[in-house]
Image: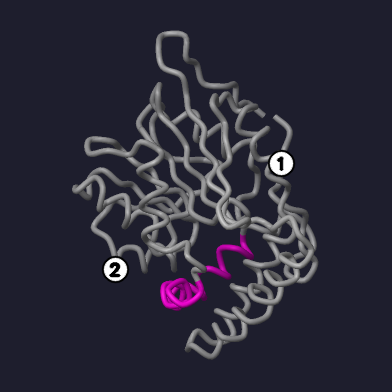
Amino acid sequence: MNELPPHPALARYYDRQSRRESFVRTLFDRGARAYDQIDRVFSLGSGPRYRRDALRRSGLAPGHQVLDVAIGTGLVAREALRILGHPAGVIGLDVSAGMLREARRNLPVPLLQARAESIPLADAAIDLVTVGYALRHFADLNRTFAEFHRVLRPGGSVLILEIDQPESRAGQAALQLYLGRIVPTLSRWLGGGRDAGEMMRYFWDTIDACVPSAAIEKALAGAGFAQVSCEVQLGIFRAYRASIGGGPGAQPPNVSA
């Protein structure tokens, strides 16, 4: 399986892909405590209602089992719980011990410290896999999507929320000013300090360098998903959806290297 990083190595932070994982884990460990406050101030309309509506449009209903990959502090998982009504219906996964610590304070759900490329769950155990604004922090999209396919039941689906560059140059310049300069600066002033500022600067730099949406959709299809789509709101918020067909013919893809 060919490797598909979500973006090239970013020399400002690390000089090669092999150092990405340790950098990302440390970055989010240090910035975890300030993350919820930053999100409340700078969510740009992608807050609780947006997440909850996206989950409902993905068919989430009581009785389903959700895996929230890169759960962070639990922003997506919290809205899933509102719909499901039972904490056993959500499992959270993250590589960052700091983020899991915050999630544990916020939510009464099972939590796993693991990589998205190697999910410690049985095959066909999940109805909906969710990712909230963390796709850019995985090491390999192809292997990650193959793992999503493996853990999903027939008829299960994926919801990936992301931010992308707007099409117009004026929109790109405005987003760069806001996310690339204003948000990192104010994140430091809000009490998050240097670590929070660096985390939000990295957030923008990964948006700027991320592979195009067409490549993400192609990777989902290549992992065996059907009905791959991308819904865009306000020119920057993207909701990728994909599903697994049901029935006896549904088979997971070959994930061998």
Please tell me whether mark 2 sits on a helix, a strand or a loop.
helix
Residue in view at x 62 percent, y 66 percent: 203
Query: Where is residue 56, by image quadrant?
Result: top left
Q: Is residue 202 magenta?
A: no
Q: Is residue 190 left or right of residue 9?
A: left
How is the protein colored in the picture?
one colour
Please tell me whether mark 1 sits on a helix, a strand or a loop.
loop
Location of mark 2 (residue): 105
- Tell me which numbered mark, 1 or 2, is placed earlier along the sequence: 1
Residue 191 is situated, as x and y percent measured from the top left of the image, at 47, 89
Q: Is residue 84 left or right of residue 239?
A: left
Cβ atoms at labels 1 and 2 below 8 Å apart: no
Residue 165 is situated, as x and y percent measured from the top left of the image, at 69, 58
Specify few, some or many for label 2: CA neighbours under 10 Å numbering under 14, 14-19, or 20 or more: few
Location of mark 1 (residue): 4
Q: Which residues are magenta?
A: 22-42
Q: Is residue 36 magenta?
A: yes
